[in-house]
Amino acid sequence: MKKSAIISVIAISVLLVSSSAIVSASWFGDFWCRITKCESVQLSPPDGANTAKLIVTVKNEKGSIIGAGRMVTLHLKSNPLKVKYSKTTNSSSTAKFTNIPPGEYYLWVAGITGRYKSWTGASCPFTLSTDESVAKDVCFEPGRGTSVCSKCPSQQCNKNNFKFAFVLLGRNESDITPAKINKVTEIKTQFKDAFSYATSNLARADISYPVKTIIDNGSLMNPEKTEFYRDWIAKKFLESNPDEFDFIIAFTAFPALDGAIMDSFNVDYDIYGIGLDSSVDYTNELERQYGFKQGEIKTNILKDVVYWSPTEALDLYVCNFFSNGLLHEVGHHWCCFVGDNFAKGQNNAQLEIIQQGIHFYRGLQSPSETGDPMNSDNWVSNNDGTYRRDNKEGIKKYHPFQLYFMGLLPESDYSKNYTLYDAGIIGIDFNDQQAVFYKNVSVNDIMAVEGKRRCSG
């Protein structure tokens, strides 16, 4: 099953009478739909059945019914461009087909609009031949000229298992050594444990894929040969590796000349309510730039490229040094974009739990003594009404707000308050020794400003 986070999805809950839901890959016209990697369901037909019944309920990406007036059509697989049977949804958003002869069909839901030039989607091919009832969910994604179908996941941007690929980048073959490959292997192994700890064991990192190497071919780096182009890292990697990773973590095998470079590039925006609403519709263009597949639905692959060029030889570093840095860059896929920067309430600033538009404000109390990878700090009392910053050494833990952005935080914690201290504004009057209480903030407060976290489709 594949899923892309391009635009809204129409979900169709199908109750059908069939012996099997036969699924295959097939093209049947550019104006229609490309069928790709759907599930196959085999059932035993009861005796004496000679017709089938089909009940289609049309829903939107939130799972709510759309209502009356949506046309649903059945097309024979042997002649997919011709409508064989059609029904219109009633006020319950349901279309009912009865006495359908046995045969292989495509199911369509009409939805031509000014923005999308094709039908909103089609099901995978299936066979109707029995009176056995089967529940079937089909996802439909709008597109310009093509659409893709697959079985709908229940929560498409909620996951707790993230797949990582680690890559070592070299200017030439001599940059790549067994010692450096071993170092990256050590780094990813320790990061696996750090990620579980940072997420309070609510998520895990799959690092099972072996370390890969990429050598510059003359077009992957800047003219000075000091940096790799981030989009070309992804494109080159995907030439010979599967497009199934949430994060591509790329280390240079050579040191940076002018200070360490550490950044991340989020290619796939598919979550509303975490401060990135305006970026969701831009996902398709970014996927194209970075070489990720479009049109094929992905099972919520995040598609993020993390780039790290250290200041010294990679194999000289202690592995623990990298864990917090990777937690920080990986965390940027979701954080920190909600509300306004801390401004002491000026200009009606909302929430004020972030700074620089991309990090947590330092004054946001971290529940962990080691602080949070996204810059929320541990604050302790001076016993005089003021507070000082005091982060202990060790692996940092994601703030509950970060866990909410990731879709991991239990709803029972949404009402819990976290303290925000006024330590001044970074670059103006920041003081990490005499902060004072400012206000409390909860996930419910975030939702009041940004709306509830939800999948784009």
Image (tube, rainbow, N blue to C red):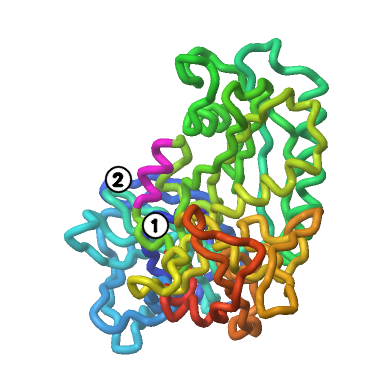
Q: Which residue is mark 1?
A: 280
| Rendered image quadrant of residue 81 | bottom left
User: What kind of residue is marked 1?
Assistant: Val
Please identify the residue farthest to the left as the structure is shown: 114
- Quadrant the C terminus occupies: bottom left
Residue 404 visible from this viewpoint = yes
Magenta segment's dominant SS is helix
For mark 1, give the secondary structure.
Answer: helix
Q: Residue at x 66, y 53 (%)?
A: 162
Q: Which residues are magenta?
A: 282-289
Q: Residues within 10 Å of mark 2 (few under 14, many from 20)?
A: few
Residue in front for this viewpoint, 169 or 8: 169
| Residue 121 image offset from top left, x and y in percent | 35, 60
Q: Quadrant of the N terminus?
A: bottom right
Q: Is residue 229 left or right of residue 147?
A: right
Q: Judge by depth and name the residue closer to the eye, 422 or 329.
A: 422
What is the number of the mark on residue 7?
none
The picture quadrant where one finds residue 88 is bottom left
Verify CB contact (< 8 Å) between mark 2 and mark 1. no
Residue lying farthest to the front in this orientation: 384
| Residue drawn 61% across the image and 82% down it | 417
Instruction: Give residue 29's mark.
Output: 2
